[in-house]
Image: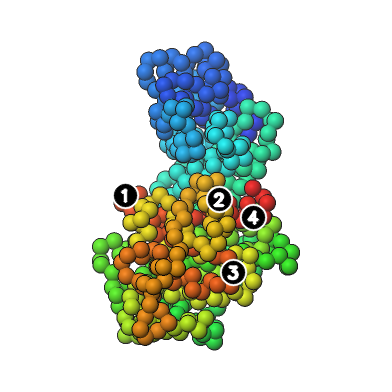
Amino acid sequence: MALERLVDFSTKVSAPAKVKTAAVVVGVFEPRRLSAAAEAVDRATRGAIRTLLQRGDFPGKLGATRILFRPRGVAAERVVLVGLGKEADFGAKAYRDAARAAALAVADTGAADAVLYLAELHVADRDLAWKARHAVMAAAEGLYRFDEMKSKKPEARALKRIHVGLAAAGHADDANRGVAEGRAIDAGIALARDLGNLPGNVCTPAYLADRARALAKDWGLGIDVLEQKDMEKLGMGALLSVAKGSRQPPKLVVLRHEGAGRREKPFVLVGKGITFDTGGISLKPAAEMDEMKFDMSGAGSVLGTLRAVAEMKLPANVIGLVPAAENMPGGAASKPGDIVTSMSGQTIEILNTDAEGRLILCDALTYAERFHPQAVIDVATLTGACVIALGHVATGLFANKDDLARELLEAGEQAWDRAWQMPLWEDYQEQLKSPFADFANIGGRPAGSVTAACFLSRFTKAYDWAHLDIAGTAWRSGKDKGSTGRPVPLLTQFLMNRAGSA
């Protein structure tokens, strides 16, 4: 269930020892050095924290927690100590890890609310608004859970509110702004995670369109949903070829946030919405095919970003395009060797029906031209090759303008949703040559993520464009299997920077 329906976030100005709350959270560096808030609580409790540390019970390792229940001298019912690791190594990652660990520790108690005194900590090159925003986002990430499909829901947590604590009111406005931004971004992340975690028999192209309509209604967004007949009139032969083997009709969602004047050119976000990918006739192996429900993560992240942008009332025009289809084998499905004509008029030889994401994206990218955009960014779980290249840490970034790439890289660093720029050189285009069509939809095993981006670049000549390959970052496998909601933070931060709201 999305976190926005479970826990709320705000700020609170109060001395750590005097704040009335079910749990006050303070930090301890390794080895056994107290943060300013922990010092204040320790004085009020006449050395209760230092006594604990001297006994060796809490050295302060990053992410470790310890709870003191009803210590004398403080107004809080509980004092939660969270380890910060070595002070010399303390940075953005450690700060977020500590906030996440603290929120989970509080949630495991019966506390209904908590005040986190972590924003006081020094994080190099990060201001108070950043620290407040990321305390919210990291705590929310840890507390998120998805149980919508279970017949018996887990017991509801008592925790309903988390405050970012401030010992003094001097910079409360910055903290309030950071918390509000964090809440909006997390709501977008939670939406993207919810959509990604739903099974393919629920989250169909029609379901995505319905969720987009609900989003538009709730947040005052404009929306159009193009049906199959509309795509046929537009000549979207590439997109339609992917949907041929499925009983689920394709959709093209156009969602509009109009936060600036009509003369202001929009930013267009294009999200791959393959709601389930069997590979089509080029059938995937059975192992882990269930994870192909996450193949609509690009679409989920675009809807999530629009959700965040709308809540923040960002002064920018943003259009979300979601081409949605199911890639299935069937009597009418596309076959290897088929040739289709894209909306741009370019012909494509389909050598592998499992390279379908680029086929639905290319027609959406051509459709984006009509909006005369400032920039277009597409988001897609596009290639396994990108996972091999970058693993599950960085998103692959390709762009036809280096300035746009630099902006996105910087936004990723600010949002802690990092990307890495990959080459988009003309040399790689050679691999897409076809003797029968203008080009093929695959270029072989070498540099597979690069040739996929090269394919998309052939449809983006009219505007500044970037491509985010999130195949390695959109979800986790294993015991913690589930959607991450990335790259909602990166996209939202980029738009905030461009709108001058960061």
Which structural element holds mark 1? helix
Q: Residue at x 47, y 46 (%)?
A: 141
- Would residue 429 be found to the left or right of residue 5 on screen? left
Q: Vertically, is 182 above or below 370?
A: above
Position of residue 383 measured from the top left corner of the image (x, y, whole percent): 37, 64
Position of residue 156 measured from the top left corner of the image (x, y, whole percent): 45, 45
Q: What separation in Å lies between label 3 and label 2 (alpha carbons)?
A: 20 Å
Q: Earlier in the sequence, mark 3 or mark 2?
A: 2
Q: Are marks 3 and 4 in contact (CB under 8 Å)?
A: no
Q: Residue at x 45, y 68 (%)?
A: 426
Residue linked to disc 2: 411
Q: Amino acid at mark 3?
A: Tyr
Q: What separation in Å lies between label 1 and label 3 (alpha carbons)?
A: 42 Å
For the question of whether residue 473 can be seen, the reply is yes
Q: Earlier in the sequence, mark 1 or mark 3?
A: 3
Labels 3, 4: front one: 3
Q: Residue at x 67, y 55 (%)?
A: 499
Q: Amino acid at mark 1?
A: Lys
Residue linked to disc 1: 479
Labels 4, 1: front one: 4
Position of residue 49 measured from the top left corner of the image (x, y, whole percent): 47, 18
Q: Amino acid at mark 4?
A: Arg
Q: Residue furthest left?
A: 286
Labels 3, 2: front one: 3
